[in-house]
Image (cartoon, rainbow, N blue to C red):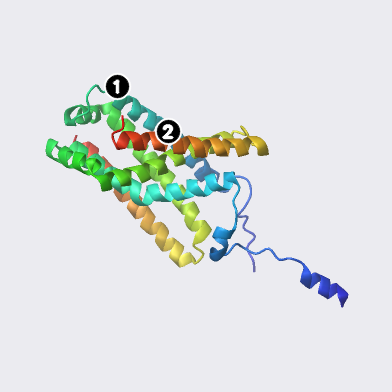
Amino acid sequence: MTDLAVRKARPQYRNIGISQILSYRLPIAGIVSILHRISGALLFLFGIPFFLYLLQQSLTSELSFASYSAIVGSVPGKLVLLVLGWAFLHHAIAGIRYLLLDRHVGIEKASSHLSAKVALGVSLLLTLVFALKLFGVF
Amino acid sequence: MTTNRIVVGAHYGLRDWLAQRISAVVLLIYTLVLLGAVVFTSELNYFTWAGLFANVWMKVATLMAVFALMWHAWVGIRDIYMDYIKPTGVRLFMQVLTVVALAGYAFWAVIILWRV
């Protein structure tokens, strides 16, 4: 009987529920990973149609090029470009990290922790440069 | 009767895994090529931009990048569906929708480049 009581007290590990997502603290590599997934989904949902539309407007004629310029020159257009720009930069840089990990470069705990920080930092830094360029600082 | 189909282990899904990585490298190279072409264009306007895409090498490179992108997106989006959408019917529906969208985008890209 004591056996049963002990068995009942054993902790159970279940799949994480949707309501618990925010209460779990991810390690930095986990943050890079979930952002890689979120940025990829953003690029698929909004990036592909938006950039194809921009490509079409920029290439079809001088007149359509003017409408392309108007879109990328407007504040809403710039904000969309900024979000998609971050998504692309994060996805690309985290992707390079994954390619290196696949080649067994930096798979030790300390170095993968460091490379996750670098990937997150570099993509945010490049996004900042892109934002400054986008809003005409240089 | 149960069927002992092995759904894990070596080679199962290797083709998709490899395709995702090869297409990623193609997209990285294309990004650098496009960036380089834009940087080395002295003044960016409709004529220099359309002139860049009028080159056969640029059309070929762009179409290769487009097809790499579609394959890459397919593998990634399917991974997301496999992780989060459990009912088979819903998942199949979303997968079909995604394939149709990606094929449509690819044809759209061909039409855009065709006219330059």
Please tell me which residue lies in front, A48 or B15: A48
Q: Amino acid at mark 2?
A: Leu
Q: Position of residue B104 (x, y in %)?
A: 30, 50
Q: Position of residue B21 (x, y in %)?
A: 49, 38
Distance of mark 1 from mark 2, alpha carbons? 18 Å
Q: Is residue A78 left or right of residue B28?
A: left
Density class for disc 1 (Cα within 10 Å; few <14, some 14-19, many ≥20) is few
Q: Are marks 1 and 2 on the same chain?
A: yes
The reply to whether discs 1 and 2 touch (Cβ–Cβ < 8 Å) is: no
Residue A15, placed above or below residue A93? below
Q: Is residue A108 visible?
A: no
Residue A111's disc is none
Q: Work out which quarter of the rendered image holds the N terminus of chain A and state it.
A: bottom right
Which badge, 1 or 2, is on the more N-terminal residue? Answer: 2
Density class for disc 2 (Cα within 10 Å; few <14, some 14-19, many ≥20) is some
At a point 46% along the width and 53% down the height, the residue shown is B78
Mark 2 — residue?
Answer: B28
Please tell me which residue lies in front, B19 or A107: A107
Chain ID of residue with mark 2: B
Q: Position of residue A128 (x, y in %)?
A: 40, 37
Residue B40's disc is 1
At a point 32% along the width and 43% down the height, the residue shown is A81
Q: Is residue B70 left or right of residue A64?
A: right
Please tell me which residue lies in front, A27 or A44: A27
At a point 40% along the width and 50% down the height, the residue shown is A42
Residue A120, placed above or below residue A22? above
